Amino acid sequence: MSENKDYCPKTETCPLFQGEMLASKKAQEIYMRIYCTAGEKGRNRCKRFMLVKEGYKPAPDIMPNDDRTVEQIIKDL
Ligand code: SF4
């Protein structure tokens, strides 16, 4: 699945995509649709992906729509 160019390259290791972060399958699907499978535009607005791009491994409690800036999340680590 992650070979699809419209998918985030982190799908295989990302706990959100792998269904380990959310109890609700429905909620997971919504996040996946907005961020993980929505091409470059989708993943580039995901805070998890932004952290990966900065060289960090996001903790499992950081959601794609975390309302902090990436800089703030890094400061809070
Ligand atoms: S877009 Fe974000 S949540 Fe989705 S697989 Fe990539 S890093 Fe994980």
Image (cartoon, rainbow, N blue to C red):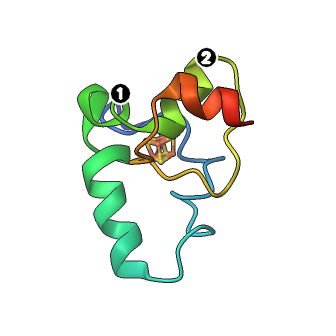
- Relative depth, front residue between 5 and 16: 16
Helix, strand or loop at mark 1: loop
Helix, strand or loop at mark 2: loop
> Which part of the image, by quadrant, shows the C terminus?
top right
Residue under the point 44% across and 82% down: 24
What amino acid is found at the position of numbered circle 1 in the picture?
A: Asn
Left or right: 5, with 10 as reference point: left
What amino acid is found at the position of numbered circle 2 in the picture?
A: Glu
Is 33 drawn above or below residue 70 in the view shown?
Answer: below
Report the Cα–Cα distance between label 1 and label 2: 12 Å
Residue farthest toward the top in the current orientation of the protein: 54
Is 47 drawn above or below residue 75 in the view shown?
Answer: below
Count neighbours of disc 2 (C-alpha within 10 A) and say few if under 14, some if 14 to 19, many if 20 or more.
few
Indicate the quadrant where residue 74 lies: top right
- Give residue 3's position: percent from left, percent from top: 45, 36
- Relative depth, front residue between 76 and 19: 76
- Give residue 45's position: percent from left, percent from top: 33, 33
Count neighbours of disc 1 (C-alpha within 10 A) and say few if under 14, some if 14 to 19, many if 20 or more.
some
Left or right: 7, with 38 as reference point: right
The residue indicated by pointer 1 is: 44
Residue under the point 34% across and 79% down: 26
The residue indicated by pointer 2 is: 54
- Give residue 70's position: percent from left, percent from top: 51, 27
Is 10 drawn above or below residue 23 in the view shown?
Answer: above
- Relative depth, front residue between 9 and 48: 48
Count up the numbered dots: 2
Residue under the point 43% across and 36% down: 8
Indicate yes or no: mark 1 CB to ligand 1 under 8 Å: no
Q: Residue 31 has which mark?
A: none
Residue under the point 55% across and 22% down: 71
Left or right: 74, with 26 as reference point: right
Is 28 drawn above or below residue 49 in the view shown?
Answer: below
